[in-house]
Every structure is written in structure tokens, then in C-alpha cells.
Image (cartoon, grey):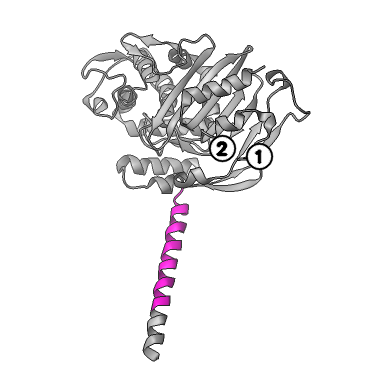
Amino acid sequence: MRSNFQSLALVILILFSLLITKEAKFENSVANQPASFAESVAASSLVSEGQNSVSPETILSKNLTESAYGIANILSYASSTNLSGYLIVNIPRGYLPKPQNDVSQLLIPNNQASSSTQQLPDIVSKIKIALVSDLDGNNDLISYHSNKRWPLASISKLMTAVITIEEIGKEKEIMVSENALNVEGNYGKLEAGKLYKIEDLIKIMIITSSNHAAVALADFYVFNQKEFVKLMNKKAADLSMGQTVFFDPAGLSPLNQSTANDIKKLIKYIDNNHSEILAYSQEKVFGDFKNINHFAGQSNFLGGKTGYLEEAKQNLVSLFLVDNRRILIIVLGAEDRFGQTQDLLNYLQHD
């Protein structure tokens, strides 16, 4: 009997030890989250020196408060598909078809869509994050998980373009290094040892999403890509992009992350200060380089940027002119970024 009791006590002790270890690991993971810009930059520096030193789960796990609803959600990148959320529709009367009622703002829990929203719940059900904003009216028309962090992928290149223009300028010529050409990606492939005007590299980076061009530009800054990335993070902080962090200039790391609300701040800054970046993205071709954005060349398309990573799925930022208003549409984690952006645009213009 005593032997059985001792065995049972030993099993209980082992289970208790395992539980304590698991809790300690969880607390340590939460403690290491980049909850502020300073911590984000520190984490960025750590990963720059050793890409395997920080796990995506540790960095991307974020305890956010969605102030619009007063609900605290733990946004874990690994379990983001299981999060509950809300779709907010706040469209001025002029945008909507004949109103069905007097409610101008609808708060719709997931999977409980009101018929008055027509096909909108079906559209956003295929997107992890969506934001439709009237930049001229300064109000969000449609918001779906717009404060949820998500891998940026090549949308990161918008910030790369901003830092390049502000810190290096567009007129210099640089020689593309073998280091830049060794980066993953085939779009916008450049030639090693060839001189390129910086403005041309920015165009190639924006319209083809060239990783080679992005790294070439970052490498040129005091010959130190790590310092360039620090400037990207500093600019994000200057623009009050509090949920944004960068780890590389091309967006190859899933640790490059932001929210739709933060991306909107960046687009507004670019539109007001460096509108040429958006103008580049409107061009269907640039020399031998073809634009991969399906909206390029359309009369109502004012510019934007694509992004794709396996971890992020399809991302797209698009600025359109709708009824003489600049309408920003952001879709992150989409199944069909161009189709679902068009669906949102069609919904907005429906009459």
C-alpha cells in the first residue's frame, strides 16, 4: 500500500512540475513580446543578427485592446483564424443603395450578418483583415479586424521606398551587389555589377515587387542593411504606427507586421509627401518590367502595393478615385486579393 501511495505521489509531483514549466514558458513568451516600438527595434536587431533566435510565435503574439468594442483579444498569429471579430459598416448615405432602415452604422458579429449588408459578410469572410476608408472624408467606411496585426509581406516595400527617398535621394546611381541578387525572388531580376539610378530601382521594386531591388537599396545606405531597417522602424514610430515592426526591407520575414489602421497612416503620409511612389505603381510597364498589380493602368486606380508570403497569404493595398473621393481599400490574408478588392469596390459603388 505504501509503495502504491509513493508511486501516486511521484506521478502527481511530475505532473505539477510539468505544469509549472509550461506556465513559465508562456509567461516568458509574453514577456518577450515587442509591446512597444523600443522593444520592437530591439527584437528586430536580435533577429537581424541571427534569424533563428526569436520565434514568430513569441514576436507576433500580441495582447491588443480593440477600443471600438472595449474587448481585449490576444492576437496570436498561430491561432488568428479562430478569433472572433466584428464587421463595422459606416458608409454615408450617398454610397449606399436605397436604405432599408434608418441605421447608418451596423455592428455585425461574425456569422450573424444582417440582410441589410447584402453580400458584404460573404466578401470579408474570405479575408482575414479588411479596411475601406475615405481619405478625403477622413472616415472608415468598412472595418474588419483593422487593428489586428498581420505579416506585411511586400507591402513593407512602401516603407523601404519612403526611407530611400528621404535618406538617400532618387538621383544617385548605385551598383547592384551579388548579395542583393542572392535574395529570394525572381520578379524584377537585376544584373550584378550594373549601375542603376535609384529612382529606377524604386520603380522596379514597386511595380514588380522585386526583392533584389529592395535589398540593393537598403545595402547602399552606409553599406548596412541593419541600420536601414532601424530607420524603417523609427519612421513607423514617427508616424504613430504603434503596431508596426520591420525586420527586413523586402518583407520576406513574417515578422514584418502591421495592422490595416497603421498601413492607412503610411499611405496617407506617402500620398501627402511622396505621391510619386503611388504614381509608379500606376504604370503597367517600366522598360522590360511588367507591373504585377492587376489594377495598374485603370483610370480610377491611384496606386497601391501587393504582398504575398505563405504565412500571410495574399495582401493588397489599393487607392481608388470613387465619386471624386480617394478611397483606400486594404485586404490582408485574402484568398483572392484582386477579386475581393474589386468586390469591396463594387459594394461601395452599388446603386
Q: Position of residue 115 (x, y in %)?
A: 68, 32
Residue under circle 1? Answer: 68
Q: What is the quadrant of the N terminus in the image?
A: bottom left
What residue is shown at x 38% (from left), y 86% (from top)? Answer: 4
Query: In the structure shown, which secondary structural element does the residue marked by tag 1 occupy?
Result: loop
Magenta span of residues? 11-33
* Helix, strand or loop for the magenta stretch, by majority: helix
- In the rendered image of this protein, does residue 37 appear above or below residue 186? below
Does residue 144 belong to the magenta stretch? Answer: no
Which kind of residue does numbered mark 2 sit on? Asn
Which kind of residue does numbered mark 1 sit on? Ala
- In the rendered image of this protein, does residue 178 appear above or below residue 56? above
Q: Is residue 268 visible?
A: no
Considering depth in this image, is 128 or 35 the residue closer to the camera?
A: 128
Q: Are marks 1 and 2 in contact (CB under 8 Å)?
A: yes
Q: What is the quadrant of the C terminus in the image?
A: top right
Marked residue nearer the N-terminal end (1 or 2): 1
What residue is shown at x 36% (from left), y 29% (from top)? Answer: 250
Spatial CA span between label 1 and label 2: 10 Å
Query: In the structure shown, which secondary structural element does the residue marked by tag 2 occupy?
Result: loop
Binning the other alpha carbons within 10 Å of mark 2 as few (below 14), some (14 to 19) or many (20 upward) gives many
Binning the other alpha carbons within 10 Å of mark 1 as few (below 14), some (14 to 19) or many (20 upward) gives few
- Residue 289 falls in which quadrant of the image? top left
